[in-house]
Image: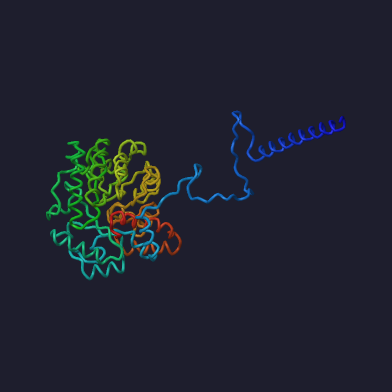
């Protein structure tokens, strides 16, 4: 019996040792797989080993907390991309221009769209057309002309007009829009609801005539009492008042059915010379612009403005020289796109104005504008020369197709948002 009792004790002792060893092994394995225990008794998770065996858990596309959300592409951009993918390089380059019907056809004044317009659009499928008083004879005539021109274009056209109200009105003279007081009058009244309602009505009238772009509102504030180019076209010299009015007018126009275009970035109200005639310079510093001139543009961007027009004035305190703003990367890319965060369509002011023609050839100005970050070149002094300069730059690699695609995609996306692509 003593011998058997000793054997039993030895067996129990061995069992206890085995259990202890198993516990130690289990603990070591837990430490290796999950990391050390925390002070609160929990276990800090560790990154799974790249060599870990796959599990049977189903795969999922749902993002985890550490994954960045996937950026979605809008239906409008998808529609634009589909058209872009089927375009030739030359078609893309033509999309970068908005010209008068006179410049497109070689006929002046162009008051109807016929075979000359059809042939011109087949040869040079520009992105858009802009119409002036000489093109507008009557309500019925302008509407028919626009509808016919649009029917001839493979890719729908942006059809624009300067209908600001006050002294810049192309359509009120033929009864297509109401006769409006200068914008300064509405700014002084301070009624943003009334301005938005006015903009909605005006937008509806402009759309009813056949246009889809109104080159308005003026977002400049007059900080120089000797300024003549802007004057009462500005809502106010008070940045806060101008900002409220610009936002209201932008919303109204676009609720009425046309794209609004803020102008003339970064603010033309501090100059004295008229950029239609030659070089116009502002001495405002970047900080001064941020505190005043840029505020209405910020408000218009927040209101969803479809386009922004960049002026020809020079801002040496911003650019370091007398380069016109619409040809300057410091203004278009650094200030407008990067600092203000605007990724919509940027159009130049008219390139047949003295501030451009006195210092640049049509080709030089067109290429510099695209390189600066603009998408659309408005009214080059010579469309053929400007277009050929872009062709040459694309051929020698100065202008990459990726850069061209960037602007054309913005233009087509804007057209999709305006309901022009179907």
Residue 421 or 91: which is nearer the viewer?
Answer: 421
Q: Where is residue 363 in the image (x, y as percent from the top left)?
A: 35, 60
Q: Where is residue 295 in the image (x, y as percent from the top left)?
A: 31, 39
Residue 292 or 388: which is nearer the viewer?
Answer: 292
| Residue 192 position by quadrant | top left
Quadrant housing the C terminus: bottom left
Among all residues in the image, which is located at the extreme right?
Answer: 3
Residue ID at (24%, 60%): 100
Q: Where is residue 116 in the image (x, y as percent from the top left)?
A: 23, 69
Please, is residue 101 above or below residue 338 in the view? below
Q: State left or right for residue 10 relative to residue 40.
A: right
Quadrant housing the N terminus: top right
Residue 258 or 219: which is nearer the viewer?
Answer: 258
Q: Where is residue 298 in the image (x, y as percent from the top left)?
A: 32, 41
Q: State left or right for residue 249 relative to residue 176.
A: right
Please, is residue 215 above or below residue 225 in the view? below
| Residue 231 position by quadrant | top left
Residue 374 or 189: which is nearer the viewer?
Answer: 189
């Amino acid at each position: 019996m003593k011998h058997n009792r000793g054997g039993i004790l030895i067996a129990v002792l061995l069992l206890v040792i085995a259990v202890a060893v198993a516990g130690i092994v289990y603990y070591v394995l837990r430490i290796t797989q999950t990391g050390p225990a925390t002070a609160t008794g929990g276990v800090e998770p560790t990154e799974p080993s790249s060599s870990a065996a796959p599990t049977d858990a189903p795969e999922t596309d749902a993002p985890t907390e550490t994954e960045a959300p996937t950026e979605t592409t809008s239906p409008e951009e998808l529609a634009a991309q589909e058209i872009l993918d089927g375009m030739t390089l030359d078609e893309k380059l033509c999309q970068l221009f908005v010209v008068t019907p006179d410049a497109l056809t070689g006929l002046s004044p162009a008051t109807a769209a016929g075979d000359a317009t059809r042939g011109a659009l087949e040869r040079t499928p520009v992105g858009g057309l802009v119409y002036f008083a000489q093109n507008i004879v009557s309500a019925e005539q302008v509407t028919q002309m626009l509808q016919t021109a649009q029917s001839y274009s493979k890719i729908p056209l942006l059809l624009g007009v300067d209908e600001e109200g006050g002294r810049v009105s192309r359509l009120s003279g033929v009864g297509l829009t109401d006769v409006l007081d200068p914008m300064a009058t509405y700014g002084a009244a301070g009624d943003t609801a009334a301005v938005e309602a006015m903009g909605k009505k005006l937008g509806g009238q402009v759309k009813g005539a056949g246009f889809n772009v109104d080159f308005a509102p003026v977002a400049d504030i007059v900080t120089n009492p000797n300024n003549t180019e802007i004057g009462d076209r500005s809502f106010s010299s008070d940045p806060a008042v101008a900002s409220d009015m610009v936002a209201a007018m932008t919303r109204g126009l676009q609720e009425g059915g046309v794209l609004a275009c803020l102008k003339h970035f970064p603010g033309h109200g501090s100059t004295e010379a008229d950029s239609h005639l030659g070089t116009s310079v502002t001495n405002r510093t970047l900080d001064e612009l941020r505190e005043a001139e840029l505020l209405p543009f910020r408000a218009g961007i927040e209101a969803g403005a479809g386009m922004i027009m960049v002026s020809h004035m020079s801002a040496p305190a911003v650019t370091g020289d007398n380069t016109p703003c619409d040809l300057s990367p410091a203004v278009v890319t650094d200030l407008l796109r990067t600092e203000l965060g605007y990724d919509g369509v940027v159009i130049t002011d008219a390139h047949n104005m003295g501030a451009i023609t006195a210092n640049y050839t049509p080709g030089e100005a067109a290429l510099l504008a695209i390189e600066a970050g603009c998408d659309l070149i408005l009214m080059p002094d010579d469309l053929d020369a400007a277009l050929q300069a872009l062709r040459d730059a694309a051929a020698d690699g100065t202008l990459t197709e990726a850069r061209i695609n960037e602007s054309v995609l913005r233009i087509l996306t804007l057209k999709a948002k305006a309901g022009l692509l179907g």
